[in-house]
Image (tube, rainbow, N blue to C red):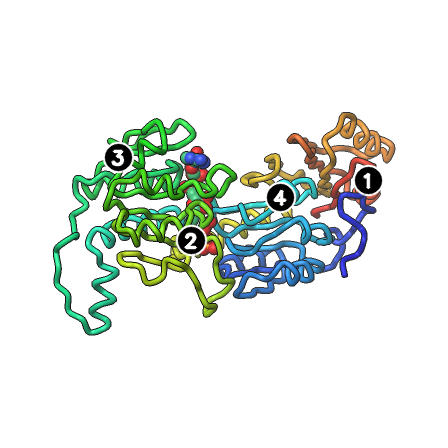
Amino acid sequence: MPSDQPLLDPQPFNPFSGSKEPLRVLLCENVHSSSHEAFSAAGLQIESISYAPSEEELRERLRDVHVLGIRSKTHVRSSSLAYADKLLSIGCFCIGTNQVDLADANRRGLPVFNAPFSNTRSVAEMILAEVVMLARQLGDRSREVHEGRWRKVSSGCYEVRGKTLGIVGYGHIGTQVSILAEAFGMRVIYYDIATKLPIGNARSVASLGELLANSDYVTLHVPATRDTTKMIGATELAGMKRGGYLLNASRGQVVDIGALAASIREKHLGGAAVDVYPEEPESNGDQFASELRGLPNVILTPHVGGSTEEAQESIGREVSIALTKFVTAGTTTGSVNFPPVELPQVGGTHRVLNVHRNVPGVLRDINRIVSDRNANIHSQVLATDANIGYLIMDLDQDVSADVCRDVAALSTNIRTRISN
Ligand SMILES: NC(=O)c1ccc[n+]([C@@H]2O[C@H](COP(=O)([O-])OP(=O)(O)OC[C@H]3O[C@@H](n4cnc5c(N)ncnc54)[C@H](O)[C@@H]3O)[C@@H](O)[C@H]2O)c1
Ligand SMILES: O=C(O)[C@H](O)COP(=O)(O)O
């Protein structure tokens, strides 16, 4: 059972990061081994598992873990974080971070990192491949020939040249898809809630409805948010062209799967390519159930949009470097839920890292502690957001442990440690 000591209470100085206890990293969901280099160089001990642990298993494992690495399927909720006494940081070895309670991690002083670009191109290439596969019904033809059935047909099969691709969410992936689609001779329109620079000849449209009504292919590249949940349901599908195609490699909850299956069965849509689902199996070999199984011209893939050797290798390096920079130097640049701080360390000093509640007077209290110890601050930087303040300071080595202990005892303290 978890201890009843929630982390939001001011903690006594926990010297684990300044002591000789080895730091441990838990990597879930087959995070690429390219991550090991940075972790090993920083002296972290690595444990890897191939699956997404359940909430209960994660809570148990987190008791003894300093750094957690996950991909898109491991849910990290407040109920797990509440008792993760040793945890310093979380790395999402992917783009999406909706699987982590980012606000709660922020309040607990835990920066979360991701890899915002490393699998972008892989997703975009898959989408273009699927546009052609849908246009030519290649998924069905391939299955038939595998089954020994020879069906050479042209009816209902088209070129993509001159057709309109509608992109919902014109961010990193959406713009890459836009470039590749134009190279194929497609017309591109897009809809985004933010004003975005059109790439090439792409044109923005004013509403989702306008995009759906004017596209032969609609591809979704939005993040999982409250607004994008079931953003494509029965009404939106009915608003698409008869014979149009829907592609979803964003997040499962963006599309109402029942409505999509009905639209295909009723032959309103000509096909769909789906990579992500509201419920996904936790590991390879698990059974997968969906209303979409067996429907004509529906390509189903097991959330592999970002699963290429190039992307995974690059993500492994990028996120492990960000995590080790945070563990060793407190750097939070690139974190998705923390104020960005990066400070070159002054030689011969110890670095104190403090996360506190963002209320007036904290810096004054901390500087008074340093001054009472007759210590010299070699460098100091503070950054804040609405909830927390994040402070790095380099101090004389002989006073750092005392200062750290006193700062950790402040009522505003969330986490304080010495990185080295
Ligand atoms: N299938 C996969 O393996 C895979 C791989 C990588 C990413 N993804 C998913 O793709 C998503 C997009 O990735 P990205 O790197 O392009 O993200 P991004 O943040 O660069 O772009 C997302 C775009 O969506 C826009 N947007 C947000 N809400 C919107 C709304 N309600 N309506 C219209 N536009 C909206 C944003 O303004 C932004 O331009 C990720 O959040 C992730 O969930 C899936
Ligand atoms: O958010 C992402 O980058 C994608 O959904 C890929 O996630 P994965 O690493 O679990 O394949």
Percent position (x, y) of residue 310?
38, 55
183, 251: nearer the viewer: 251
Q: Mark 3 or mark 2, which has the lower sequence index?
A: 3
Q: Nearer the viewer, mark 3 or mark 1?
A: 3
Left or right of 378? Residue 124 is: left
Q: Residue at x 52, y 50 (%)?
A: 319
Left or right of 260? Residue 407 is: right
Mark 3 Cα-neighbour bin, 10 Å: few <14, some 14–19, many ≥20 = some
Label 4 sits on a secondary structure element that is: loop
Mark 1 Cα-neighbour bin, 10 Å: few <14, some 14–19, many ≥20 = many
Q: Nearer the viewer, mark 2 or mark 4?
A: 2
Does the CB distance between marks 3 and 4 fall below 8 Å?
no
The residue beneath circle 3 is: 214
52, above or below 353, in the image: below
The residue beneath circle 2 is: 276
The residue beneath circle 1 is: 403
Mark 4 Cα-neighbour bin, 10 Å: few <14, some 14–19, many ≥20 = many
Farthest-out residue, front: 266
Q: Could you say which disc has been placed on residue 111 in the image?
A: 4
The part of the image, by quadrant, that contains residue 192 is top left
> How far is mark 1 from mark 2, CA to CA?
49 Å
Q: Mark 4 or mark 1, which has the lower sequence index?
A: 4
Q: Nearer the viewer, mark 3 or mark 4?
A: 3
351, 349: nearer the viewer: 351
Percent position (x, y) of residue 394?
71, 38
315, 101: nearer the viewer: 101
Q: Residue at x 47, y 53 (%)?
A: 278
Q: Nearer the viewer, mark 4 or mark 1?
A: 4
